[in-house]
Image: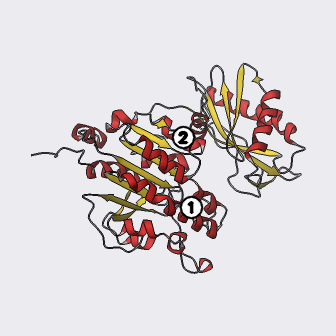
Amino acid sequence: MRLDDLYSQLTISTGAKLVLVVLDGVGDVATPEQGGLTPLEAAQTPNLDQLAQVSALGRMIPVAPGITPGSGPGHLALFGYDPIEYQVGRGVIEALGLGVDLQPGDVCARANFATLDDKGIVTDRRAGRIPTETCERLCARLQERIQQLGDTRVIIRPGKEHRFVVVFRGPDLEGPLTDADPNREGLPIPRAEPRDPQNPRQQKMAKLVAEFYQAALPLLAGEKPANGFLMRGIAHQPHIPQFEERYRLRAAALAVYPMYKGLAQLVGMTKLEGPQTVREQFERYLAEYDRYDFFFIHHKATDKAGEDGNFEAKKRAIEELDAALPVLLQKKPDVLAITGDHSTPCVVRGHSWHPQPVLLHSRYSGTDKRARFTEHDANHGSLGLFEARFLLRLMQAHARMFDKFGA
């Protein structure tokens, strides 16, 4: 019997309220350059610390030891899906989050505007995080000039800052492809290639991506700093079991960035649009409390600061959430989990393989008698070190949603 099947057999509805708060990329490592502290340790977090003192703590492996996850696998694990079994292209997630009505056979790519030197070498993968208004202008230009490639329609939608998506809609298309992204500065843009070189649909898709670059790059040549772009997560939409069917929980998502809305939509959560700050997200949670059983609340600023290597900004992003936390606690859920989808250490300036800290609070969580919510305190918590895909199952257990197994 598959473990998920066993969980399904044991699941019962209790009417409990569950909340998952994700400080994206919150995990970090203490280094001499940072005074021997992580941003969590350096931040002033009286509300998180007070909660930690009456909660269980631990750390989670997002995928498997040593594997650095993207945001998609990291969040799917938090939603209780094995990220190795359910692999979803980032382009699909981003397209859904931007409200694209995907059709069977669509292939999606997540794209970044980037800066290239005169030899085509990537010098900035995010083009200085151009304003969203600039992204919208450039996407409109590309869409106006590139609407069709052969028998394939091209759909371009702007996202936040430097991010946008490209959807290819036509016959005989399939992903996944390798990324047209070197994933670091100092290298040229690689050609997207079929993951299965013998698959003719992937071969056609790879040629279309090359044609799109050939058509699009000249349209950006005069721009500064966004004179190029990178594409990754080039794939089609897979089938994935829906959240309510899997957990017997009506779920809602409060996220600002399209990708995280798309991840939530992919598993069947309702996107609650409007809030732009973490305080507004918590206020919306209060307003929607009676309509849903499970709330996913996403805070992006911690990850952005980690990717920029900005220790002080990451500390401030943590403090921003801490200051707003009392709003959420006005209607304290039966089970509250606070964690990250992965670690984004400032010294790495990107996602990493380090386990992220997690706090779990319920009537039944007990207390680990730890003073703060930090990586160090989490290392000594009763939850220990476990795979992130089991967090939601632990939340269900703390909501008394599992019948007893066996006699």
**Mark 2 and mark 1 residues within 8 Å of each other at the beta carbon:** no
Q: Mark 1 points at which residue?
A: 344
Coordinates of residue 377 in the picture (x, y in percent): 40, 72
| Nearer to me, 311 or 177 | 311
| Nearer to me, 382 or 386 | 382
Coordinates of residue 86 in the picture (x, y in percent): 45, 40
Q: Is mark 2 on a helix, strand or loop?
A: helix
Q: In this view, does 86 lie to the left or right of 14?
A: right
> Which residue: 80% across, 38% down?
137
Q: What residue type is labelled 1?
A: Thr
Specify the quadrant of the image occupied by residue 311. bottom right
| Nearer to me, 263 or 7 | 263
Q: Is residue 154 left or right of residue 256?
A: right
Q: Which callout, 2 or 1, points at the residue further toward the start of the chain? A: 2
Can see residue 84?
A: no
Specify the quadrant of the image occupied by residue 204. top right
Count of marks placed on residues: 2
Measured Cα–Cα span from mark 2 to mark 1? 20 Å
| Nearer to me, 192 or 130 | 130
Q: Mark 2 points at which residue?
A: 261
Q: Which amino acid does label 2 sit on?
A: Lys
- For the N terminus, the image quarter is top left
Q: What element carries label 1?
A: loop
* Residue 367 versus residue 60 in the image, above or below: below
* Residue 305 versus residue 53 in the image, above or below: above
> Which residue: 16% across, 46% down?
404
Res 145 label = none
Can see residue 118?
A: yes
Q: How crowded is mark 1: few (under 14 residues within 10 Å), some or many (20 or more)?
A: many
* Residue 55 versus residue 380 in the image, above or below: above
